[in-house]
Image: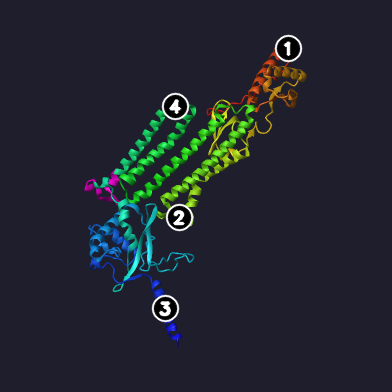
Amino acid sequence: MKSAPLLLATLWLMLLGGLAQAQSDAPWFEVETLNPGLGPTPNWLDRSTPRATMESLLRSAPTDPEGLSRAHLLDLSDLAPEDQAANGARLARELLTVIERRAVLDWGQILDRPDALDARQTSSSATAGMKRRSLLVWEIELDGIPAAIRLDRIKPADSDPVWVVSRQTVQKIPALYAVYGPSQYEELLPDGLRRHAFWRLMWWEVIGLPLLVLLAGLAGQGTAVALRRIGRHATRRITRAAFRAARLPMVLAAVALVLAIGTQTVFVFSGRLNSVLTPLIAAGFVTAALMLIVNVIEVILDQITGFDELDLTRQQFDEARTRATRIAAVRRILVIIVFLFGFGIVLASANLFRTYGFSLLASAGVLTLILGFAARTILTNILASLQIALNQSARIGDRVVYKGALCHVERINFTYVQLADWDGTRLVVPVNEFASTTFENWTLKEPEMLRVLKFKLAPEVDIDRLRSCFETVLDDLDQSDLDDRDKSAVRVTGQDAYGIDVWFMVPCRDPNSSWDSACLAREALIARLSKMQTDEGVPIFPDIVPPVESDPPSRAAA
């Protein structure tokens, strides 16, 4: 019998727990009354679904300029009933202003069902088939912490459930309005400029944005001129190089700074413009900072290595060519890391994937495919550039023959290879094309090489006389440009009706100067052979008359 009271107490607690659980599972929040200080709700105010509530908040401003009716769209439970009418209208106006200036609503995510059930979700989603009583509309940064704009479904004891702005959101409206409401400069504008023009923009935004962009451009131009003039007075070379490297980043920073001050401090633009301006400003600051870092590092590396002052085509700078190419590869890797880091910062700061339906593209991976397809050529060239720099198939300063052109590699950039032709012209070749095309590298591995001079001579020429003449020619050349003289040779490699093919092999020490040595040897050899033929009457060059092509028949003859 003593256990009967304990059993009854246990059953009572279980009953209360079951009732509490049943109430927590209800698709709404139950209250005794909702906003008793506002009086009856207007019949035209629709609060049946989340989308209807937000639409009523945004579209009823012309018919309810004071916000008395829109106060019914807020949960004013934290206000005393006697204060709800006056403060509720003010809070409704302030919330509308904040939403228009900072939020870009995705109406596809604001459901038009009383139970807020999203029938489009897959079975793997956490809220699939779930009736919700609270729905997140947007998040706005407030003192570095996102402040949620949320709707709650509330059921008073004497009426049907309705969707209203949550009590927690209402608590943050004054702080949000203080940050994102009209600035003191905007309040000084005439009322005509503060009226809506089109696309939910006010006239001062339509007029002020082009003026702000013009002012930002002038600020960037002024920064460039100032840095250029200051740099002219620099006495040290590294200082002048630093000013040149910092010019473009500082111009970008000045433009971004003016835009940031104009759109976030002096004036507060609407959410549609902010969704575009915020990523651009963030990208401007990040790009300026990262470009400054990369440019300064490059200036420091150039000063340390001093490759610009060296003629890397000379044989004695073989190790310098290797170091220059490896440093170029390190620069590319550094730029790629910096770019990825900056791109992530821009995306994180701009919250880009939540605007204009980009969340769907990001979740499905479509945006990644689009960006990858658009950047495939650039990425291919960058990877090919790294491949060349790492496998050392062509180093900066190497002498190469590319598609019949004798050049030396001057630069290996991200997307192209710059080749300096022997006549001073530059060939700009896409890196991917350069890496996939066969070319001769005269400097790779062993620097020594044989340059072959090919002559067509008369069949009765004396080969021993030719060898003696060739040795004399080699004696007259700069011996520092020649390799082991034992490698020189004169060979008859073929014959035909016109004469014999004779090859004169010039051993060269440095492939970068071998072309000049071969040209000098050919010039001297032709001169000696011609003199031998003239003085001794011995045939050296074959007497060949080139065939004359017959003219095509004229129309008259036809």
- Pointer 1: what residue? 536
How crowded pointer 1 is (Cα within 10 Å; few <14, some 14-19, many 20+) is rated as few
N-terminal-most mark, 4 or 1? 4
Q: Amino acid at mark 2?
A: Leu
Q: Amino acid at mark 3?
A: Leu
Q: x%, y% of residue 87?
A: 25, 60
Q: x%, y% of residue 446?
A: 69, 31
Residue 234 shows which numbered tag?
4
Q: Is residue 346 visible?
A: yes
Residue 13 shows which numbered tag?
3
Q: x%, y% of residue 153?
A: 34, 67
Image quadrant containing the C terminus:
top right
Q: What's the CA distance linking mark 3 and mark 1?
A: 131 Å
Image quadrant containing the N terminus:
bottom left
Q: Nearer the viewer, mark 4 or mark 1?
A: 4
Q: What's the CA distance linking mark 3 and mark 4?
A: 85 Å
| In magenta segment, residue 550 | no
N-terminal-most mark, 2 or 4? 4
N-terminal-most mark, 3 or 4? 3
Q: Amino acid at mark 1?
A: Glu
Q: What's the CA distance linking mark 2 and mark 4?
A: 51 Å
Q: Secondary structure at mark 4?
A: loop
Residue 361 shows which numbered tag?
2
Q: Is residue 278 above or below residue 304?
A: below
Q: Amino acid at mark 4?
A: Ala
Q: Write down the region rendered in magenta.
A: 188-207
Question: In the current view of this chain or complex, which residue is farthest to the top?
Answer: 535
Q: Quadrant of residue 36?
A: bottom left
